[in-house]
């Protein structure tokens, strides 16, 4: 991270995943968090990323093609009948 | 046992007991992710759908043999990857996942959002990102916001899609993703970073207008 003491907002947005994934050295975490303490924009940005992750976590996928679902349900029932 | 492990052993017991609802729900929940993973190994969508179907048939047949050395969903994905690789080989497309990662150096946020070299505060925000916490409970719960996120994910390169679906939609750990896809942790993290950053941008356009 730059010279180890300073980090710009433009750099923050590129290392935010390392931060939320806890893949940052303690020194870099200190630098990162010191920046957040002074910069509301980056604090909101990190928060936006956390909200993005939570939002994606609420996606409930479905849309299994009917034909596939029928085939699989038939196979599943066959299994329980010991076929 | 952790809550996740408890839920999983209950699910396994229900599947083995022939609980059709549990099976159907699991098939639905994993479908988008399985299809995306399959599509990184085989050419077209129809073949990828076949791979997903073959995987479930393998799961049905193997349920009683599953020993629980990995989690159930990791076991399912490992069957899928094997099936997809076999099909990919038949189609002469045996590309390891890692080599599919495109050299995507697109920045997380457009450079215009930051102050340039002429400025005293080079690399600082020109205007701050919005505070979403105020909106978090209302707008973000909105179906339309979820659709925006889903659309953004579906427009990502397949490798990024695979990683964000596994990690953030399905809740696989980074270790599980790396082992299943045979990709390094650092690569996984780069793909996840690109994917999350693009979805955030899409949400920002939607929420902030």
Image: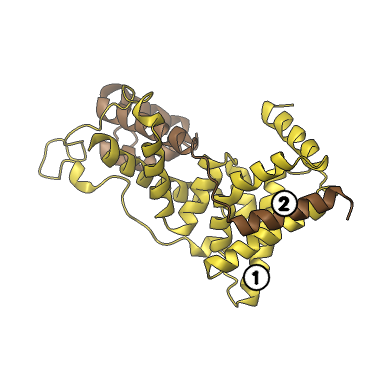
Chain colours: A brown, B yellow
Mark 1, Cα crowd under 10 Å, few <14 / some 14-19 / many 20+, is many
Query: Residue A65 at x, y = what percent?
Result: 58, 56
Q: Say what secondary structure mark 1 lies in.
A: helix
Which residue in the protein does label 2 denote?
Answer: A73
Residue sitting nearer the eye, B112 or A28 = B112
User: Is disc 1 in contact with disc 2, using a CB cutoff of under 8 Å?
Assistant: no
Q: Which mark is residue B57?
A: none
Q: Which mark is residue B87?
A: 1
Is disc 1 in the same subunit as disc 2? Answer: no
Horizontal side of residue B79 vs B117, given as left or right: right
Chain assignment, label 1: B
What residue is drawn where x is 36% and y is 29%? A47
Distance from the alpha carbon under mark 1 to that under mark 2: 23 Å
What residue is drawn where x is 74% and y is 44%? B70
Report if residue B71 is visible in the image.
no
Residue sitting nearer the eye, A15 or A53 = A53
Query: Residue A68 at x, y = what percent?
Result: 64, 58
Chain assignment, label 2: A
Mark 2, Cα crowd under 10 Å, few <14 / some 14-19 / many 20+, is some
Query: Residue B181 at x, y = what percent?
Result: 60, 55
Report if residue B185 is visible in the image.
yes
Horizontal side of residue B96 vs B14, given as left or right: left
Foreground mark, 1 or 2? 2
Horizontal side of residue A27 vs B119, given as left or right: right
What residue is drawn where x is 79% and y is 50%? A77
Rendering quarter of residue B91:
bottom right
Q: Say what secondary structure mark 2 lies in.
A: helix
- Quarter of the rendering occupied by the C terminus of chain A: bottom right
Looking at the picture, does residue B103 appear above or below residue A44? below
Looking at the picture, does residue B38 appear above or below residue B180? below
What residue is drawn where x is 77% and y is 41%? B15
Query: Residue A59 at x, y = what percent?
Result: 49, 39
């Amino acid at each position: 991270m730059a010279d180890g003491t300073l980090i710009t907002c433009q750099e923050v947005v590129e290392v935010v995943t390392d931060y939320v994934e806890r893949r940052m050295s303690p020194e870099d975490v200190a630098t990162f968090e010191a920046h957040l303490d002074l910069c509301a924009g980056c604090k909101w940005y990190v928060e936006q990323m956390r909200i993005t992750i939570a939002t994606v976590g609420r996606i409930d996928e479905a849309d299994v093609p009917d034909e596939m679902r029928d085939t699989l349900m038939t196979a599943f029932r066959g299994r329980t009948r010991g076929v | 046992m952790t809550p996740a492990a408890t839920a999983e052993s209950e699910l396994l017991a229900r599947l083995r007991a022939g609980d059709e609802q549990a099976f159907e729900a699991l098939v639905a929940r994993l479908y988008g992710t399985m299809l995306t993973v399959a599509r990184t190994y085989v050419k077209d969508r129809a073949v990828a759908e076949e791979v997903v179907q073959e995987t479930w048939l393998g799961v049905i047949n193997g349920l009683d043999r599953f020993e629980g050395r990995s989690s159930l969903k990791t076991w399912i994905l490992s069957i899928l990857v094997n099936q997809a690789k076999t099909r990919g080989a038949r189609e002469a497309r045996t590309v390891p996942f890692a080599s599919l990662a495109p050299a995507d150096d697109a920045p997380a946020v457009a450079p215009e959002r930051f102050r340039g070299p002429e400025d005293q505060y080079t690399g600082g925000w020109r205007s701050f990102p919005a505070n979403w916490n105020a909106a978090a409970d209302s707008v973000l719960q909105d179906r339309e916001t979820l659709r925006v996120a889903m659309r953004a994910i579906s427009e990502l390169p397949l490798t990024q899609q695979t990683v964000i679906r596994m990690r953030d939609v399905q809740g696989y750990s980074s270790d599980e993703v790396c082992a299943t896809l045979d990709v390094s942790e650092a690569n996984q993290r780069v793909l996840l970073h690109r994917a999350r950053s693009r979805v955030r941008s899409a949400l920002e356009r939607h929420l902030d207008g």
